[in-house]
């Protein structure tokens, strides 16, 4: 059968070219000669009868056929890792590596706390967390570079299984002694009278905020614009004014009484969704499945 002739070495070399975008870079990473990589890729193309790459002046990009083969190769490699992990689990050894990717807000306090709590129960588990833009988190899951992605999404993604989804409304954050802190919810008009610090316009919270302002005909002149959430938060903590956030990002600080969070009572402020994402069609290792269950239970906002 044709599928039985797709050899492991050839697929491994092919997948490295996909990841690196060039034969020479793939050869360096594999510690082999470029000609060896080229031969394996050419053999695959001869076997399948189609080009697997579009050759470009500045590198190689997978063709449609190459994308399909890459998806197959990634799933095969991930399945092999899963089998090894589950064999170890049969002996009661809860060890292994859980690779996470998340957008920045989740990585400040929420995920570090959840990971630390999980390791109390399973001290043999290790984590690798990469922080990226919301879209890049999904790409990491699709490429097999992350077992679990925690990100914001506004549309469905092909080949992504959503393990948990919930609304992630934009909230206003302030010091507990701020004039608006006596309110559980506020309007944009109420916020307009106070200094505010905002994230850059490519941030999803900022985008929803700007849409709401446009609908209300309000123009905010921020006291501070910054692409680093911790800077915005410390500006608020030092009395600089208001800011905006997602609930999970500031959950721990609100629970400690450092910040007050108020819902913004405006249409469209809940248009963003928090998603836990995994790769469709993949059987996850036991350790990843255990953490996934733990993460799902920790994500929903506490009641009250």
Image (tube, helix red, strand yellow):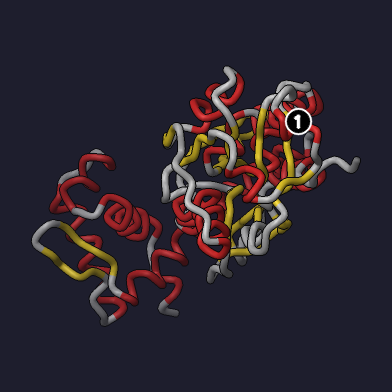
Q: Residue 120, can we see it?
A: yes
Tell me the residue that label 1 is attached to: 118
Residue 229 horizontal/vertical position (percent): 51, 33
- State the residue in front, 220 or 140: 220
Residue 118 horizontal/vertical position (percent): 76, 30
Who's the residue at 55% across and 53% down the image?
A: 209
- Taking the image as shown, residue 41 lies to the left or right of residue 250, namely left
- Taking the image as shown, residue 184 lies to the left or right of residue 197, namely right
Who's the residue at 34% across and 76% down the image?
A: 65
- State the residue in front, 175 or 258: 175
Instruction: Judge whether 269 appears above or below 87 on screen.
Output: below
Circle 1 sits in a helix, a strand or a loop, which is it? helix
Who's the residue at 65% across and 28% down the image?
A: 109
Residue 198 horizontal/vertical position (percent): 49, 39
Image quadrant for the N terminus?
bottom left
Q: Residue 134, can we see it?
A: no
Who's the residue at 40% across and 57% down the image?
A: 8
Corner quadrant of residue 27: top left
């Amino acid at each position: 059968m044709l599928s039985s002739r797709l050899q492991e070495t050839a697929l491994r070399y092919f997948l490295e070219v996909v990841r690196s975008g060039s034969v020479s870079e793939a050869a360096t990473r594999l510690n082999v000669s470029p000609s060896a990589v080229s031969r394996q890729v050419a053999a695959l193309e001869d076997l399948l009868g189609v080009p697997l790459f579009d050759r470009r002046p500045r590198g190689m990009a997978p063709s449609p056929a190459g994308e399909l083969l890459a998806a197959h190769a990634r799933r095969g490699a991930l399945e092999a890792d899963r089998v090894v992990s589950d064999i170890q689990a049969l002996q009661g050894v809860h060890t292994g590596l859980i690779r996470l990717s998340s957008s920045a807000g989740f990585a400040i306090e929420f995920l570090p706390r959840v990971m630390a709590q999980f390791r109390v129960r399973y001290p043999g588990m290790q984590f690798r967390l990469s922080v990226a833009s919301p879209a890049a988190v999904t790409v990491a899951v699709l490429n097999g570079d992350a077992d679990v992605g925690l990100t914001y999404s506004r549309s469905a993604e092909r080949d992504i299984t959503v393990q948990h989804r919930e609304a992630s409304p934009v909230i206003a954050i302030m010091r507990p002694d701020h004039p608006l802190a006596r309110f559980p919810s506020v309007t944009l008009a109420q916020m307009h009278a106070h200094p505010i610090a905002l994230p850059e316009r490519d941030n999803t919270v900022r985008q929803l905020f700007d849409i709401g302002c446009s609908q209300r005909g309000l123009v905010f002149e921020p006291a501070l614009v910054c692409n680093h959430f911790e800077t915005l938060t410390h500006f608020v903590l030092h009395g600089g004014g208001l800011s905006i956030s997602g609930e999970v990002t500031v959950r721990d600080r609100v629970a400690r009484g450092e910040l007050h969070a108020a819902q913004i009572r405006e249409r469209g402020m809940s248009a963003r969704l928090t998603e836990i994402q995994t790769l469709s069609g993949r059987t996850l290792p036991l350790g990843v499945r255990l953490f996934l269950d733990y993460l799902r239970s920790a994500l929903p906002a506490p009641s009250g």
